[in-house]
Image (spheres, coloured by chain):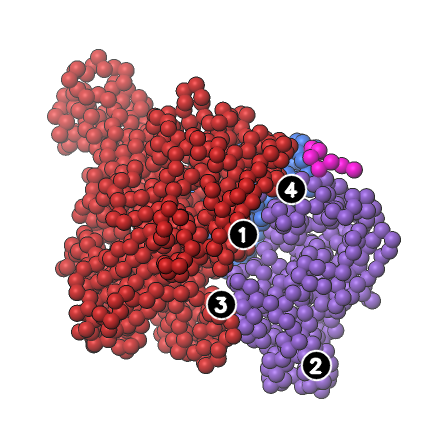
Amino acid sequence: MRDAHEPMPVSLNVNGRAETAWTTPRTTLADFLRHELGLTGTHLGCEHGVCGACTVRLDGAPVRSCLTLAVQAEDRTVDTVEGLAEKGGTESVLHPLQEKFWKHQALQCGFCTPGFLLAALAAVEENPHLSRDEVRERLSGNICRCTGYQPIVDAVVEYAAEARGEQS
Amino acid sequence: MNMTEGWVGRRVKRVEDPRILLGRGRYADDVTPARCLHAAFVRSPVAHATITSLDTEAARRATGVVAVFTAADLNKICLSWKGLLDWPGLVSGDQRPLATGKVRYVGEPVALVVAESRALAEDALELVEITYEELTPVVDPIRALESDSSVVHDELATNLAFEADFGSGDVAEAFAEAAEIVEVGMSTARHTAVAMEPRGAVAEFDPASRSLTLRLSTQAPHMLQSTFAELLGLRENNVRILTDEVGGAFGMKAHVYPDEIATCCASILLGRPVKWIQDRIESLQSDTQARDERVVAALAVTSDGKILGLRAEIISDGGAYSVYPRSMVTEGIQVATIMPGPYRVPVYKGHLRVVITNKAPLAVYRGVGHPVAILVMEALLDETARKLGLDPAEIRRRNLVAPEELPYTSVTGHVYDSGSHQESLETLLGLIDESPALAKRKADARARGRLLGVGLACFVEVTAPGVAFYGARGAPITAHDQVEVRVEPDGSVTVLLGTPGQGQGLHTTAAQVVADHLGVHFDRINVISGDTQVVPHGTGVWASRSAVVSSGAAASAAREVKERLLAIAGHLLEVDPSDLEISDGSVRVTGAPNVHIGVDEIAEIGHWRTDRLPPELRIGLSVVGEYSGPNVTFNNGAHAAVVEVDEDTGMVHLLDYMCVEDCGVLINPDIVDGQVRGGVAQGVGGALYERLYYDETGQLLTSTLLDYLLPTCPELPDIRIAHIETPSPVTMLGVKGAGEAGAAGAPAAVHNAVNDALAQLGARVWHQPITPERVARALDEAAGQTWPEPPDTPGLPIFEEDTDVR
Amino acid sequence: MKLPAFAYQRAESLDEAVSLLAEYGPDARVLGGGQSLLPVMALRMSNPGSLIDITRAKDLQGHAFRAAEGLVVSAAVTARRLETDPETIRRHPLVAACLAQVGHVEIRTRGTVCGSIAHADPAAEAPALLLALNGSVRVAGADRRRRIAAKDFFLGPYLTALEDGEVVAGIELPLLSDTAGWAIRETARRSGDFALAGVIALLDTDADGRCTDARIAVFGLAGTPRRATAAEMILTGQPLDDDVLTEAAQHAFDDIDLIGDLHGSVTYRRRTGIRLVERSLIDARARRAQSEVESPYA
């Protein structure tokens, strides 16, 4: 039988890079990303699956990294906010959705922002034809305390339109 | 300078955003020093009890545990505190890092476990053995005032922390002359800020120099530098408070918290870095709370709806301790003093009592008293309009302060230096969708089993308070923040703000102001804040002050630096500096545009080639500027909400929301819009969803985000905003604060909309949040159907000296 | 708010899950999507010594349409997968519609349908769905496999007929007749919240328009999902006119003990429940009428 405190190796692909680290079974994917891999862009706002700040993509699908064990991500692909931008020379070039967030001021304190970005990207990839109301509904699992959501919706709607090939 | 071509007023994208968007923000938990230990707290599971035994031995022996501390350990190195501003009669019990002898609210820290990881620290919490002998909890603030009530702080022998009257004039006479008297009794529920980033502290004590470096999620670094130095017996210049990104604060992160200072104590006692990151249960239990107000108020009017007088009886449930240093009375006092609002109220008496109870401390949260004051006043106006058969807009029109009356001194002594009180209402009415007409929309909704309602709320909001607010009352909270503007040798500009940001975009607005007042391009400016060892003094972000105070100080520093640049340029170009102007980083001779010199060249000479400059020239291109301004400046505006109430379920659906905001000169309209929207969202939260629910034993039933409900995306409509810009004649840039106006007006607008809807069936609701339960019950009771359960409504105060008035 | 320590074992098959459960003893728990279990553990309201992760068990991944049992869903199938599965949307649209109401997308992406059944939250959709469909739960234990009917499975809040060492291996969700009309409605404080009151209604009629099958499952109202049997009896055999639907709704809770909490009292829940039942019956009747014109198999 295994011991509860015994660390286990976890190998996974994070933002296109193979990573391996040892961790205890109780370590959530969120804590693993933040503290084992140093990817602190994924934030913890409630640790009980309600606020959505910790949302990452697991094999492309949006999940709560606070309600996913790191050991459950073994052999999986994880995308976090740090992986969105392209490295262009010495400057990081914002992802088009990040650009829309910047343009529409879809963030203030920014703590919820990584979760919104990952949730919205998954949503638009699944269905670029989401209406404004559908975007609102689809993002209902993420809490923002600063913006009143409207600029987030603006950013996502405009990004989706461009993803469909329309001019905004 | 031609401001219309400057950076002020532009919708500039925020300089704060790229690194946050890239996931490179640095919040409190994002930094972990080497050899860092992790703290977790044993918190009281009961509201009121004597601690009869406390045994930490088993916890000390647990895996990974380095130390377990109790009050006995920490009281040796940390003084007690209480927030006693210089308000006559205000009393409070002492507060300490860990509960000493007694616990007074659920969630109060009792013991501190320090371990190699947070998880291991949490594992050991349940091994700390504590025996509580429960005392009668003081939960209902009205019952708490009765002579046979249990007492929260034995040494005070009362639960009444503070009592005062506000207003002036002969209220009894006004009410005797009134054609109509309308009375309402209302309450707002306990809320808390729920900043998305919980609080957190990373303390590093250096025993050699007796210095403390403390990374905190806070909105008031310098205030905490002073208070922590005082309480821990350290020299102020040996306390360094650090913040980078702060994930929201909203007034809640502006206090001395037991758990944060206990974390410092642990680092001092262990000589190692100690990190404590709050979890959400701790946040809901132990962050300062707000809005727990019960008000009975009456309005006396003439037959044509002119206000003759106003009176209010206010009970503010202050919780267990008066927070340090702001105290527990600010919210109640603002409920009492803001209530007359933008209306001509000739006489007023507000009687306030702030009560100590076994709940988490009540303090300031975005809007501080305004949401409650405005709610009560606006509800009174709507009820009066119904009684007189007046349109809700018309009764407001008849009572709003007129432009020719400005500056206007309110009956509570507030000075409205300028404003657009009437114009805001008219602009708002123009925003309300009247196609089809509201009457038809109401009829259409009825056909679908829905009740449509529209609610208005006009407001004034106190912003950018001067030293009279806190400093003159004995708290280490200034009004004169400082900003340093520094031109680097290559001509780029560094701005050091005394005041940090928590997401409002202060770095962006400061850069816009400096760009204009110094005459350099926005992109050449870097802004730094949040390190008390580096930046000049400021007391943080509160009371919608930063845009006014920080920008004012930045402008003053920038102007001084500009003068020095011009003096150097004048020498180099051999012209009188008064004939020079700077724009976009270039100094030109007025009328001779071909004669110019770049700021970069001046800066280079000012740093490396001072041999070319005369010795008497002041060449330092770094200046600290400060803000000086009035005691307060009020913004104003008006809100409208359109709701539908589902008769079957009692659910309220917010369909449309409009806000007119006049905060004087707009530095960055996008940022102001963001403040308005975010504030409205929080106000809607209070009106419809948010409630910290303490049961009759003082147990908190809402300690997760599944129970404490925040509005999410589908619950909010798009918010349509119109701006009026009436510059303040008394602040440095004509700017007025804007941060709380959304939160201030929204509860009233939503509430009035719901009651407009319910009034179609003769029903009303009087308590927030307006839950489906309360709506359904109101509808049933209006239809003559009683419910067997006791109503979910708090008790209300009654008017003192009732017979005098009616 | 960190999880308490536990040993972790990944089961590669149902048999291995069952034997690991036996090996690790009574304080072992099955870990599916973890969307209900992990929050409870984070709040330290549950402290299992070990978790047996079945999400990668090879024989628990699928779902299939079977003539006898209907839609059979294995334990590792997530709500999101079923909700977005074109065949499920076409052949068992009520299942897709109900699952789309569960929490938020991010929760449904990890959360399994069977996990929700095993968790038995009285306000959850999946247990009520199972009950409305007269479905059953396939249970595997060390010594036996058994099938438990939905009506016998839910014993109380978070309490089921599962015994120590048993695993929910799958569920059976019988199909509806081509002509049946259905509806799901729920009232929640916010989008995605657990229901203050929820109703799943099914109606079928004969050629004369008389009700041949009436099923009403309610959730969020009592200690378990419940069938509103009194209302079902009123409807059965009757023409589905407005008066009958209204009368059925009025009696929906005659034999159900409602439970109130801080989000809604018993009276609120009864009042809202009655009206939701009525609305759901109207919706189901409308869908019944529609199905005459366009059969999903057409």
In three-dimensional space, the C-alpha distance between marks 2 and 4, rounded to whole angstroms, equals 48 Å
Q: In which quarter of the image is the N terminus of chain B?
A: top left
Q: In which quarter of the image is the C terminus of chain B?
A: bottom left
Amino acid identity at mark 2 = Met
Label 2: chain letter: C
- Residue B441 vertical position relative to residue B711 in the rendered view, above or below: below
Q: Are marks 3 and 4 in contact (CB under 8 Å)?
A: no
Q: Which chain is red?
A: B
x then y, percent, for residue B722: 31, 57
In three-dimensional space, the C-alpha distance between marks 4 and 1, rounded to whole angstroms, equals 18 Å
Disc 3 packing (10 Å; few <14; some 14–19; many ≥20): many
Kind of element beneath mark 4: loop
x then y, percent, for residue B400: 22, 64
Q: Which chain is blue?
A: A
Which quadrant of the figure has residue B582? top left
* Residue under pointer 3: B772
Q: The purple chain is which one?
A: C
* Residue under pointer 1: B704
Kind of element beneath mark 2: helix
